[in-house]
Amino acid sequence: MVSRVIPVDPFDLVVFGATGDLARRKILPSLFHRFQVGQMPDTAQIIGSARSEMSAQAFRTLVRDAIVEFVSADDYEAETLDGFLERLDYVAVDATGDAGWNDLAGKMRADMVRAFYLSVGPSLFAPIAERLSRHAIATPDSRIVVEKPFGHDLATAQKLNAALRGSFQEHQIYRIDHYLGKETVQNLMALRFANSLFEPLWNSTHIDHVQITVAETIGVDGRGEYYDHSGAMRDMVQNHLMQLLCLTAMEPPSKFTPNAVRDEKVKVIEALEPVPQSDIARGQYRAGGGQGSYREHAGNPASRTESFIAMKVKVANWRWAGVPFYLRTGKRLRARESEIAVVFRDPPHMIFPNAEGLRGNALVIRLQPDEGITLRTTIKDPGPGGLRLTEVSLDMSFAEALGADSRAQDAYERLIMDVIRGDQTLFMRGDEVEAAWAWVDPVIQAWEDARTEPFAYDPGSSGPEEALMMMHRDGRRWRQIGV
Ligand code: BG6
């Protein structure tokens, strides 16, 4: 099934930090893909911007190299790439000075959607936003896009929000969490709110617990300095896992509009209970498999930063009372696997003998790899000789079921086009980010005050033993990673 492409309106998009890693890896290749499928009008203009002086031609060469490096050669033709490169221009600006801003202003065209993508460190958000406004480059309809990390804690997030709101209004600010652009994450909303099958069961009467896992095989080598000041809680839980939790737990919005959806997500975050340290297992990977330890990668031999975290979270509201949400994420684990597993309660009365060991119904929403949905069911073991039970999964891979394009769309493709369309549904609102930090801050503070060390775990494992023990204490089991 080929997905329908609806062209967006003509636009001027300025990418600040256009020569940086994120722009080269994600933003520019994503724009290229959207150009290639015909979603980008011929009049679209993409202006790269960074501090260094460079001709437009040199920038095009840099982008060509990035596309050759990060896009598979099977996925495009040379003429298409040439056509895309013609859409590009370049202006050097000094983010904290005056140079270049008038040149940039001169490139902007009337009657076009204007978007500014700040692929730069958070310390440059405010200076760039202020200059866009002062030089009248930003109009009341322009959009500004910012990347995570959106703050290091509540206080810094509030400062960033205040700085952006000094020059832009909330309806113009697009805070990216790329997990919201993943196909299955959006499918979670479709599954819940476009089917009548699940909603009657989606509560504490029928659900025993929920497990959200984002397991990665990569380590932190190459970005150890950033990561060591962040850790899994700030890098992954405050944003990506929080978003997955919100979409799983939220009430049905009355309509699919940006604020209706985000209002419901904020309510979930505000309903989160404080988490005691006994419900948290933090881990740090050892050396192994020919690679260094976390501490070597971080360049900090005494680091107490976690590269793994597992925690039990409670949503204190009518729907979820008594249903734990177990969150788990880590680096250098056995497999790259992300999923949300909704585990249902056992039948209230079991009439069949030998039912021990069966795990009951679970609805598993797989984010990666192989996006899809699995429903674990209990059926009769085939054959004569009495009625014995066994487990079988109804398994739907989206690629197989829908014959989806062989190239999976990157989350950034969807999100950047949403910016141009002016749709904020899949972006975090300022109060949402602050609410998430308000919940995360005391949890981090507690382990920092206690100066607790993370538990060591082997690379290629499922994390530290303590995470398993946390589940065992509750009489439950984690789903296995990489099996
Ligand atoms: C980023 C984190 O936001 O998400 C990284 O900073 C992490 O540490 C990455 O590796 C995971 O994203 P994905 O899309 O590969 O699951």
Image (cartoon, rainbow, N blue to C red):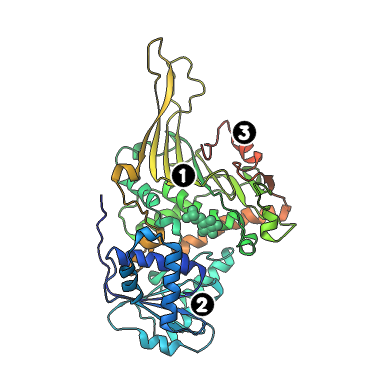
Which of pointers 2 and 1 lies earlier in the amino acid sequence?
2
Which of pointers 3 and 2 lies earlier in the amino acid sequence?
2
Which of pointers 1 and 3 lies earlier in the amino acid sequence?
1
State the count of labels: 3
Q: Helix or strand or loop: what does disc 3 sit on?
A: helix
Alpha-carbon span between mark 1 and mark 3:
23 Å
Which residue is disc 1 drawn over? 339
* Mark 3 vs ligand 1: CB below 8 Å: no
Tell me whether circle 2 and circle 1 mark residues in contact (CB < 8 Å): no
Q: Is residue 218 above or below residue 259?
A: above
Report the mark closest to the observer, 1 or 3.
Answer: 1
Report the mark closest to the observer, 2 or 1.
Answer: 1
Q: Pick the residue in front: 279 or 466.
A: 466
Q: Helix or strand or loop: what does disc 1 sit on?
A: strand
Tell me whether circle 1 and circle 3 mark residues in contact (CB < 8 Å): no
Kind of residue at badge 1: Glu
Q: Position of residue 424 (x, y in %)?
A: 37, 64
Kind of residue at badge 3: Arg
Q: Which residue is situated farthest in the top direction here?
A: 385
**Residue 474 left/right relative to 450:** left
Kind of residue at badge 2: Ala
Q: Helix or strand or loop: what does disc 2 sit on?
A: helix
Alpha-carbon span between mark 3 and mark 2:
47 Å
Q: Residue at x 46, y 44 (%)?
A: 339
Q: Is residue 89 above or below residue 432?
A: below
Which residue is disc 3 drawn over? 473
Q: Position of residue 120 (x, y in %)?
A: 51, 72
Q: Position of residue 304 (x, y in %)?
A: 70, 55
Alpha-carbon span between mark 2 and mark 1:
36 Å
Answer yes or no: is residue 238 visible. no
* Residue 448: quadrant of the picture: bottom right
Which residue is disc 2 drawn over? 126
